[in-house]
Image: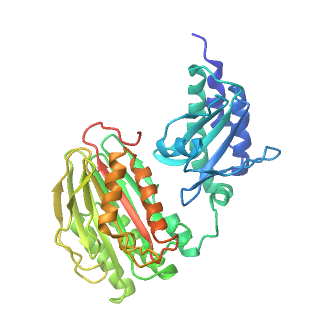
């Protein structure tokens, strides 16, 4: 059988991009999209607050305007990870995902409604474009510059560089996180590592604000990663992070945390809670349990708590959060609170939202509750155990 010529632009995109700088990626994508029959193609990256999809410009290309995530076809493609067509069939929005990380969307302008067999090459081209963006982002600031809607503090710059990808997914588990305020983070962070049988997750909230808190959180995450990569047991990891903080910062600085492990085969969840809010278990769109365990003192104070365990059921979700979530205050002084958090999570789960979209909506609800002016970092991480072979990243 003769090769499909429409597949050549898809295969050639990465090869043609080997020696281009990040600024040249939008033009290269448009060129390859035209080879597939599209009139044009534009990359829209989601901003750090995940409210706006921002177009990447290219020399001599048409000027595009940012598109809101809420209430638009482009935003629906981003939120649901489903293709979206304009009413007249002349514009196709394709979600751009690398691994399981939502980067934005690509808008393909078409001359008219296309047959189904013309769509698959554009989907493949989008996947290759996402891979290209992630690869090229290490070599320049073009993508970062256009993602940002306002200046970022040095502490926030440090915090974002420290984070793993916000979403990970495999056939047995999904891990997704979100943080706010995006441009003024300080001491909140999270981390994870997944191997063939175990997912290891940690959420941190360092004492204080600004750069000093960011440096404290950086040391905590580095100590955690070092212990995790040495394959220390959960209790040994907590002790190692605790000692590192105590030796480096003394007894007057500390980090609250939850360190956890999930057995991907059995759903056995183990955790240690060190002066941190207790995670919630969401089952069937209801919060069914608070994972108190035998909590100890924050890391750095010498007694991080004892290990506890819980057997999860397939599709259970464990939600970690920092106190900036529940203690966010409205202008009239009302706390966001655990009940409001539980209700929002329950409604999002009942609506069938994938974990990244659930957390995006949660963070926006917190920001809206506090009129956009958070007094403390607010971080949430959602871990779903899917059992064997269940899918939850797609609606």
Return the x and y of residue 363 as percentages of the image width and height: 45, 62
Q: Is residue 52 left or right of residue 58?
A: left
Q: Is residue 391 left or right of residue 29?
A: left
Query: Front-most of 125 and 15?
Result: 125
| The quarter of the displayed image where residue 189 is located | bottom left
Query: Front-most of 152 and 373?
Result: 373
Residue sitting at 30 percent across and 67 percent down? 338
> The N terminus lies in which quarter of the figure?
top right
Residue 320 appears in the figure: no
Spot the residue most to the front: 332
Return the x and y of residue 145 as percentages of the image width and height: 67, 60
Residue sitting at 67 percent across and 57 percent down? 146
| Count of numbered marks | 0
> The C terminus lies in which quarter of the figure?
top left
Query: Front-most of 121 and 65?
Result: 65
Is residue 78 shown above or below 330? Answer: above
Return the x and y of residue 249 as percentages of the image width and height: 39, 86
Residue sitting at 42 percent across and 56 percent down? 359
Residue sitting at 58 percent across and 45 percent down? 72
Q: Is residue 62 left or right of residue 158?
A: right
Return the x and y of residue 124 as percentages of the image width and height: 56, 32
Look at the image and name its color scheme. rainbow
């Amino acid at each position: 059988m003769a090769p499909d010529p429409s597949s050549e632009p898809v295969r050639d995109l990465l090869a043609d991009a080997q020696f281009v700088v990040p600024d040249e990626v939008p033009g290269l994508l448009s060129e390859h999209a035209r080879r597939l029959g599209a009139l044009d193609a534009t990359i829209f990256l989601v901003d750090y607050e995940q409210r706006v999809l921002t177009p990447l410009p290219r020399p001599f290309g048409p000027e595009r305007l940012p598109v809101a995530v809420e209430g638009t076809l482009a935003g629906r493609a981003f939120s649901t990870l489903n293709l979206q067509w304009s009413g007249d069939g002349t514009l196709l929005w394709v979600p751009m995902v690398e691994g399981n990380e939502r980067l934005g969307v690509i808008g393909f302008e078409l001359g008219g409604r296309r047959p189904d067999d013309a769509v698959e090459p554009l989907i493949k081209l989008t996947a290759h474009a996402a891979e290209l963006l992630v690869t090229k982002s290490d070599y320049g600031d073009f993508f970062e510059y256009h993602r940002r809607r306002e200046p970022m503090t040095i502490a926030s710059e440090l915090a974002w560089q420290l984070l793993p990808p916000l979403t990970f997914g495999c056939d047995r588990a999904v891990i997704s996180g979100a943080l706010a305020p995006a441009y003024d983070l300080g001491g909140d962070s999270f981390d994870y590592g997944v191997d063939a049988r175990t997912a290891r997750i940690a959420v941190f909230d360092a004492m204080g604000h600004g750069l000093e808190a960011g440096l404290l959180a950086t040391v905590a995450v580095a100590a955690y990663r070092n212990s995790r990569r040495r394959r220390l047991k959960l209790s040994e990891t907590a002790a190692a992070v605790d000692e590192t903080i105590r030796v480096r910062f003394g007894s007057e600085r500390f980090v609250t945390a939850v360190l956890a492990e999930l057995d991907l085969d059995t759903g056995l969840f183990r955790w240690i809670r060190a002066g941190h809010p207790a995670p919630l278990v969401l089952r069937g769109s209801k919060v069914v349990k608070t994972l108190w365990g035998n909590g100890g003192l924050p890391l750095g104070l010498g007694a991080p708590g004892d290990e506890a365990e819980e057997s999860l059921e397939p599709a259970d979700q464990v939600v970690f959060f920092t106190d900036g979530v529940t203690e966010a205050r409205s202008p009239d002084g009302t706390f966001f609170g655990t009940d409001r958090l539980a209700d929002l999570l329950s409604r999002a789960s009942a609506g069938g939202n994938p974990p990244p979209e659930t957390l995006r909506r949660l963070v926006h609800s917190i920001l809206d509750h506090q009129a956009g002016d958070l007094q403390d970092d607010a971080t949430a991480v959602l871990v779903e155990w899917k059992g064997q072979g269940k899918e939850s990243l797609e609606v």
